[in-house]
Amino acid sequence: MRTIKNLFATRLDKSSGRIRIVALMFALLFAVLVAKLLYFGMKPEVPNTVRSAASDAVAAARPDILDRNGEVLATDIKVTSIFAEPRRIIDKDEAVELITATLPDVDAKELRVKLGSHKGFVWVKRAVTPKEQQEIFHLGLPGIGFLPENKRVYPNGPIAAHVLGFANLDGIGISGLEKYIDGQGLSDLHGAGFKLAAEDLKPIVTSLDLRATYAVRDELAKGVEKFKAKAGAAAILDVNTGEIIAMASLPDFDPNNPADALDPNHINRLSVGVYEMGSTFKAISIAMALEANKVNLRSSLDARESLRYGRFTIHDFHAEHRMLTVPEVFIHSSNIGTARMAMLVGVEGHQAFLRKMGQLTRLRTELPESAEPLVPKHWSELNTITIAFGQGLNVAPLQALMAVGGLVNGGQLITPTFLKRDEAEARKNAPRVIRPEVSESLRYLMRINAEVGSAGNANIPGYFIGGKTGTADKIVHGHYDHDKVFTTFMALLPADKPKYLMLVLMDEPQAIPGTYGYHTAAWNSGVVTGKIIERVAPLLGLPPKLELPVLPFPLLAQMGYGFANTPQHSKGQIH
C-alpha cells in the first residue's frame, strides 16, 4: 500500500520511478504495434483479400479489332475506376453523401447498400474522368481507392456496330465479333488466371472496309429518311471470297453506349430478322430450273392467263398476258412463269435445291446472332409455287445474299465471313451448286434486267451492273397487306466478271413524289443501291469505265446464245 502511495507522490525524489514506468508502458505499446505491422506484412495473401478481389473484378484486356486495311474498329484504353472497402469505412452515411455530391450519376440508394455490406471490395464507379478522380481523392475518405483497368472503346461510334457487337464493363463480349472472340478461347485464358495485356494479344483483322461501311450506312440512312421507311439494311459481299465488305442495319446503336443495343428495334435485320424475300428469290428458282435442264434461255412459259391452283390464283404484278421466254420471265418478274418452272422441277427437287443453297437451315457465321428460317411444316406443291416467287419461306437476308452469290460466282456456295481471307481459302471447301454455264446465265439475266427491266435505277453509267428487285407484301393479322411492303434489291458488280454483290432492303418504304405512287423495290431500294454503287465502287478499286466489255458472256456465246453478248436497247420482247 505504501509503495503505491509513493508512486503517486509528488516529491521530486520519487519522480524517476514514475518516468521509468511510463517509458516502459510506451515501449511495450510500440513493440505491440511493430509486431502487428510485421505480422500483416509477412502474412501470405489469401483469395479474399482486397487485392485479389480487385484483380478479379478489373476488366481484362481484349485484342484490337481492325478493318481489312488496318484501321482500328475496337480497342482498349486505360482508365481509372473507384472502389470501396466497406469494412474500412467509418461513417457510411457521410461517405455516401460526399461521393454522390461529387459523382451525381452514382445512385445514392444503391451505393448505401453496397457500403453497408460486409464485402471486402465493391465498385463505386467504373471508368471515371481524371477530374472525377481528383475530386474523390481530395475528399480523403478512408476505404475509398482507385484501380487502373481496361475500357473497350469503339472510335467510329455506330459504324459496323452490329458486326462488332460490344463488350461490357468487365471486358466480356456480349454480342457480335466481341462475343465470338471470347468463344475462341480468350475468356478461357482469362478464366485460367492469365493476366494478358493488350500487347500480348494478336489483333483480329475483319473483312470490313471502314470507308465502304461508312458510305453504305450514310446512303442507307438518307434512303430510309427519304422513303420514310421503318428500317433499312445493306451489305456488300465479295462473291469470290465470301467476305462481307460492308454492313449496316438501321436503326442501329453506338457500342460505346451498349444499353441502346437492348432496344428490340435495333436488331441486325440481315442476320437476326427473317423475311419473305420477294422476287429476289426468283433468281434461285430460275437457276434451279436451268440446272435441272427443265428449261433453257430459249424456253417459253405460258403467262397468258393467271395460274389457278385449287382455290388460289397466282397473278403477275405487271401482267404481259402472253408466252414469255425465260429472260422475259426474269425481267418482267413473272410470278406465273417462275411458278411454272418450279412445278417442272417438282416439290422434292425444289426442297433439295433450296437445302443445297443453304436456305432451309440456320446460317452460321462468326456472328453469334442468327435466326432459323421459317419453313412450311407441310410442304405441298402450292408451297413450291409460292416459294418460287418469294412468298411462304422466311429467311435471313444474309443467307439469301449468300445463295445469289453462289449463283453468280461460277457456281460455288461460299459461306459468308466477317474475317479477312483470300479466294483460295474460301473456295477450297465450297461445294459446287450449279454448273458454270448456269452461273453465267444468271449473270446475263441480271444484266439485261438492269438494261431493260426493273433494275434500271441501279444501272449506273460506267459500270456493267446486273440486278434484281424484290417486293413482298407484309403479313398483318394473318393476311397480306398491299400497303405495307418489304423491298429488296440485289446488284452485281460487274456482271461479266463478278466481284461484289450488294443487297439493300427497306421495311415499309412509302411512295413519295417522283415515284408515281409506287413503293415497290425499284423505286426505293433500287435507288439507294445506285447511290451506294456510285459512292463505294471507286473506294473498292472499281472506277467507272467508258466502254462496256466486248464479250461479257463467252460460255453462252459458245453454246449458241449470241444474243447474250448483244446489249438490249428496247423494253420489247427478248428472245
Image (cartoon, grey):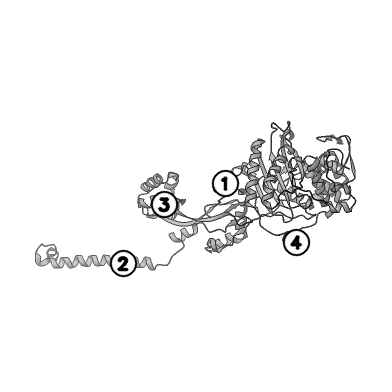
**Front residue (pair 311, 339):** 339
Give the residue at mark 3. Answer: 133
Res 568 quadrant in image: top right
| Residue type, mark 1 in image | Asp
In 3D space, how far apart are the residues under numbered discs 2 and 3 (Cα atoms)?
33 Å
Q: Secondary structure at mark 1?
A: loop
Left/right placement of residue 348 relative to residue 150 reads right
Label disc, if present, on residue 428 of the rendered structure? 4
Give the residue at mark 1. Answer: 254
Give the residue at mark 2. Answer: 34
Res 217 quadrant in image: top right
Residue density around tag 4, few if under 14, some if 14–19, many if 20 or more, within 10 Å: few
Disc on the earlier residue, 2 or 3: 2
Contact (Cβ within 8 Å) of mark 4 with mark 3:
no
In 3D space, how far apart are the residues under numbered discs 1 and 3 (Cα atoms)?
26 Å
Instruction: Give the residue at the far front of this rendering.
Output: 546
Q: Residue at x 78, y 44 (%)?
A: 281
